[in-house]
Image (cartoon, grey):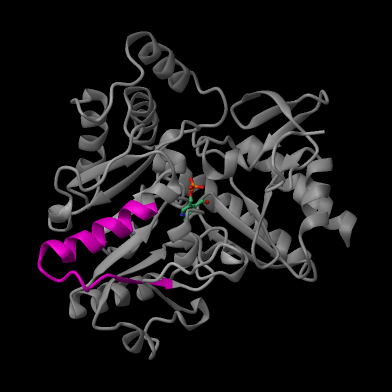
Amino acid sequence: MSSLAKNYNRRKISFKSGKGSYLFATNGKKYLDFVQGIAVNSLGHSNPGLINAIYTQSKKVWHVSNSFIIPEGEKLAKRLTKKTFADCVIFQNSGTEATEAAIKVARRYFYSIGKPKKNRILCIKNSFHGRTIAAIYASGSKKMTEGFGPKVPGFDHIEFRNFKPRFPNLRGKIKKNTAAIMVETVMGEGGIKSIPDKCLKYLRKICNEKKILLILDEVQCGIGRSGDFFAFEKSKVKPDIVPIAKGIGGGFPIGAVLMTKKVSKGMTPGSHGSTFGGNPLAMSVGNAVLDHIFKKGFLKNIKKLSNYFHSELNKIQKEFPKIIKEVRGVGYLIGLQLFFDQTKFIQKLMDNKLLTIRAAENVVRILPPLNVRKKEIDQAIKIIKKVCKEIK
Ligand SMILES: Cc1ncc(COP(=O)(O)O)c(C=O)c1O
């Protein structure tokens, strides 16, 4: 009998070790892991570079507090800002802390320019920004907020299905006291739904017009998963604030909020903080992750191989049009939307030694490590095809 609370519906399996794209279970079986801790292990399991980083740093110093200069964090922030829209960074420990920090940065910016009442955040209904008390109300999802009242005020919502390049009611949703629009560039938990580039451009235009901020949550789709460092890059849109987490730590808990110099104005000493956020151990791992992701050709290879993966999955969809409704997503953030509940399909994939995970709207979510090999993709394709045949 487990002494853990029952807030997770856990599968009846555990693992003793992992290597690259594979997990070795205590039942003696070897699984192709296309969950990777839900888009966290960007470089797979037991990556030698990450092991070396954590081992080397652990012998020097683990934790010192943000009351002191942390050179490893200075280095990681410098590398992140050099490669992106951002001018500065605040480190956190998780995705939800990063999205909360993003909301705080936006509100504090308006406070700092003498507009403290400009504090409402406009989000997509049934999106996902994490599980803290504010983040669940940002999501606007009944399932996540039920029983956790009183309601946290300050959030308004728009429907994703209305999210078309020039949908008429967006302007109406922006009130005098709206501070920011916050959306996931690709909705992960919500069913792997990408916001079209045209729509992102339109959001930017409206934000400029209304002088409000654009927050793009890249906790799940960022750090190379889309084939670009950030999923919004191909739209050429420049956000004001971007929360990240998951992939940047490669399995070590790191979150961060990236922002422009302009909006960082309110983040004066003492305005925000975190005991663990940005400690030397975490920062060394983050730097080791970037050593790989920033390597010449790394992102290009993700694009090339993930295009192949998508095209093979689309072939399977055409072969089984009564099972798979749609192949969704970008890069290695892939969703197979089924015509029926996905539980049995995911179980059958697992029986065939491929691990995947669910998302909303009957979606089977496929999240290989970013350094997955072609032969591992081929293995997954074979298993998915076999399961489609079995389930027919
Ligand atoms: C887009 C997005 N934002 C925020 C979060 C919350 O991250 P965490 O679970 O690390 O708090 C998630 C987690 O899945 C996410 O996908």
**Screen quadrant of the C terminus:** bottom right
Q: Tell me the residue at 43%/81% (across/down).
A: 164
Q: Could you tell whether 209 is left or right of 159 in the image? A: left
Can residue 75 be found in the magenta stretch?
Answer: no
Q: Tell me the residue at 50%/71% (across/down).
A: 140
Residue 356: percent from left, percent from top: 69, 47
Q: Could you tell whether 146 is left or right of 168 in the image? A: right
Quadrant in which residue 183 is drawn: bottom left
**Which residue appears farthest toward the top when viewing the image?**
59
Q: Tell me the residue at 49%/37% (across/down).
A: 42
Q: Is residue 371 visible in this depiction of the protein?
A: yes
Closer to the camera in the image, 273 or 348? 273
Residue 66: percent from left, percent from top: 24, 30
Is 358 rendered above or below residue 325? above
Q: Tell me the residue at 43%/34% (across/down).
A: 249
Can residue 109 be found in the magenta stretch?
Answer: yes
Q: Could you tell whether 320 is left or right of 248 in the image? A: right
Residue 275: percent from left, percent from top: 33, 33
**Which residue appears farthest toward the front when viewing the image?**
150
**Screen quadrant of the N terminus:** top right
Is 215 rendered above or below residue 247? below
Is 148 rendered above or below residue 4? below
Q: Could you tell whether 328 is left or right of 247 in the image? A: right
Quadrant in which residue 204 is drawn: bottom left
Q: Is residue 230 visible in this depiction of the protein?
A: no
Is 183 rendered above or below residue 247? below
Specify start and end residues of the magenta stretch as a single range.
99-123
Q: How many labels sit on residues?
A: 0
Closer to the camera in the image, 373 or 262? 262
